[in-house]
Image (tube, helix red, strand yellow):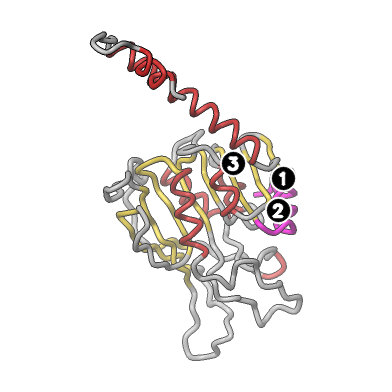
């Protein structure tokens, strides 16, 4: 039972308890409940696959791990979900397997709803891809374009080859309001970001993003020492970028083969 509730039941009617005293008891209740919640989270949260220097990587399903993270403990989301299209390159000699989750088009939105609990209010999200955000407590959206500076290789051999990807920019919101974004971007800039894609033998993941692009997003929408969240971490490029920008980071990845590679990159100080 709450301390304030226990006291109210035991104070005779007609006897006034100072409001300040009741407020103090209410504050104690909140502190005690937060401590209990934190203990429960620690009991359920798996041991990090990798942890060092403010960077933590968890191996598991983000839908199971996100509810265990502390509420409003992160300040920026940068993540690249599977697009739900079971993509697999038809051009590589050694082909990657289809990524886990890449057959579920609703996974990105489902996971982002859970991530909003972990993200502080009025902060930014960068989610690679296009999704339907109806019913999600976000606002002030914009569509950014990552220009890869090269034509993409796809199964479509038509006249036009896509050389870009979409990045959805969002702001978290308080319940019942439209997100306004408490941390403005460092500089107002255009919506086209030009960074060459990772090519050839350097490609280690079927959806690998250049660290320079991720650094640009992180530097634009967070401060030194703040925490970046990536719940589709892949081989850890967002974590590498966050460390290079002087931020802390939390990553979650469901496939152990990618966790192993991310941990190796982080241990080696890879850029």
Give residue 168's quadrant in the image.
Answer: bottom left
Callout 1 secondary element: loop
Give the percent coordinates (x, y) of residue 235: 66, 56
Q: CA distance from mark 3 to mark 2?
A: 17 Å
Q: What residue is disc 2 on?
A: 259
82 w.r.t. 158: above or below: above
Residue 246: image tag? none
Of badges 3 and 2, nearer the viewer stands 2
Task: Write down the region rendered in magenta.
Answer: 254-271
| Sequence-earlier tag: 3 or 1 | 1
Q: In the rendered structure, does residue 263 fall within the stretch colored magenta? A: yes
Give percent across and percent down for residue 229: 53, 46
Tell me if residue 84 comes above or below residue 178 in the rendering: below
Q: Residue at x 62, y 40 (%)?
A: 55
User: Considering only vertical position in the picture, is 147 above or below 22?
Assistant: below
- Marks 3 and 1 sit apart, C-alpha to C-alpha, by 17 Å
Q: Residue at position x 64%, y 49% from top?
A: 271
Q: Is residue 176 left or right of residue 258?
A: left
Up-down relation of residue 128 to residue 54 (above or below): below
- The answer to whether mark 3 and mark 1 are in CB contact below 8 A is no
Residue on which disc 3 sits: 243
Q: Secondary structure at mark 3?
A: helix
Tag 1 residue: 49
Task: Rate crowding at label 3 as few (under 14), some (14 to 19) or many (20 or more) other CA atoms within 10 Å.
Answer: many
Q: Quadrant of residue 200?
A: bottom right
């Amino acid at each position: 039972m709450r301390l304030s509730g226990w006291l109210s039941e035991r104070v005779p009617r007609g006897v006034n308890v100072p409001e300040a005293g009741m407020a103090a008891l209410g504050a104690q209740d909140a502190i005690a409940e937060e401590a209990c919640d934190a203990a429960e989270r620690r009991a359920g949260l798996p041991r990090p696959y990798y942890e060092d220097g403010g960077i933590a990587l968890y191996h598991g399903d983000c839908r199971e791990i996100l509810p265990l993270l502390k509420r409003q403990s992160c300040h920026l989301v940068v993540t690249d979900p599977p697009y739900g299209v079971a993509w697999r390159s038809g051009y590589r000699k050694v082909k990657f397997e289809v990524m886990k989750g890449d057959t579920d088009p609703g996974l990105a939105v489902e996971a982002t709803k859970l991530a909003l609990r972990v993200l502080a209010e009025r902060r930014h999200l960068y989610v690679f891809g296009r999704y339907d955000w109806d019913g999600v407590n976000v606002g002030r959206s914009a569509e950014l374009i990552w220009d890869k500076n090269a034509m993409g290789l796809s199964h479509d051999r038509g006249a036009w080859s896509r050389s870009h990807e979409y990045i959805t920019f969002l702001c978290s919101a308080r319940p019942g309001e439209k997100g306004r974004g408490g941390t403005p971007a460092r500089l107002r800039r255009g919506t086209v970001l030009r960074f060459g894609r990772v090519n050839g033998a350097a490609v280690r993941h079927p959806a690998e993003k250049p660290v320079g692009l991720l650094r640009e997003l992180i530097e634009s929408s967070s401060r030194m020492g703040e925490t970046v969240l990536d719940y589709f971490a892949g081989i850890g490029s967002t974590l590498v970028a966050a460390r290079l920008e002087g931020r802390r980071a939390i990553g979650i990845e469901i496939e152990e083969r990618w966790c192993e590679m991310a941990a190796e990159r982080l241990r080696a100080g890879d850029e």
